[in-house]
Image (tube, helix red, strand yellow):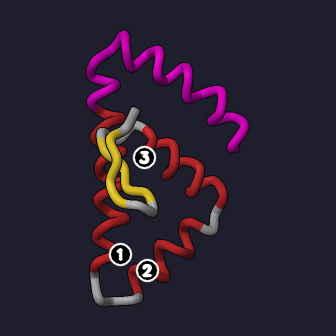
Amino acid sequence: MEAMLLWAKPILDQYASEYTWLMVSLSSLGALMCLAQMVVAITPSKKDDAKLEQLMSKKWFKTLFDMFKSFAPAQKDKSGFKKSE
């Protein structure tokens, strides 16, 4: 799955530059992924943390999650927020 997404990312980048609606959709999905991760991190309940960890343990989910986050206009890493390149 991960190898498939490695070749899919450049193709999606190419189509995203040709079709603006695709770029808006991918950026929106990426922003939602970042927002969901932040909401899970700041809520006091540990149930949502456990559910996210359970999902992230699945390789296909983590790969898709990371791919969508790579399209986000801003991303959060260990040192804080950074603008996507």
Residue drawn at x 37%, y 56% is 76
Percent from the top left, x then y, of residue 16?
A: 39, 20
Residue drawn at x 63%, y 68% is 57
Where, by quadrant of the figure, is residue 41 drawn?
Answer: bottom left
Spatial CA distance of label 2 from label 1 is: 7 Å
Element type at marker 2? helix
Where, by quadrant of the figure, is residue 22 drawn?
Answer: top left
- Looking at the figure, which quarter contains the C terminus? top left
Q: Is residue 12 placed above or below 78 in the rendered structure?
A: above
Percent from the top left, x then y, of residue 46?
A: 40, 89
Spatial CA distance of label 2 from label 3 is: 18 Å
In this view, the residue in front, 40 or 61, is 40
Asked if the residue under mark 1 is in contact with the one under mark 2, i.e. CB atoms within 8 Å, the reply is yes
Q: Is residue 43 placed above or below 13 in the rendered structure?
A: below
Element type at marker 3? helix
Percent from the top left, x then y, of residue 64?
A: 53, 48
Q: Which mark is residue 69?
A: 3
Q: Main secondary structure of the magenta part?
A: helix
User: Is residue 48 a member of the stretch shown in magenta?
Assistant: no
**Label 2 sits on what residue type?**
Asp
Asked if the residue under mark 3 is in contact with the one under mark 2, i.e. CB atoms within 8 Å, the reply is no
On the picture, is 57 further left or further right than 22?
right
Q: Which mark is residue 49?
A: 2
Residue under circle 1?
41
Residues in magenta?
A: 1-24
Residue drawn at x 69%, y 34% is 4
Percent from the top left, x then y, of residue 6?
A: 65, 33
Mark sitting earlier along the chain (2/1)? 1
**Label 1 sits on what residue type?**
Ala
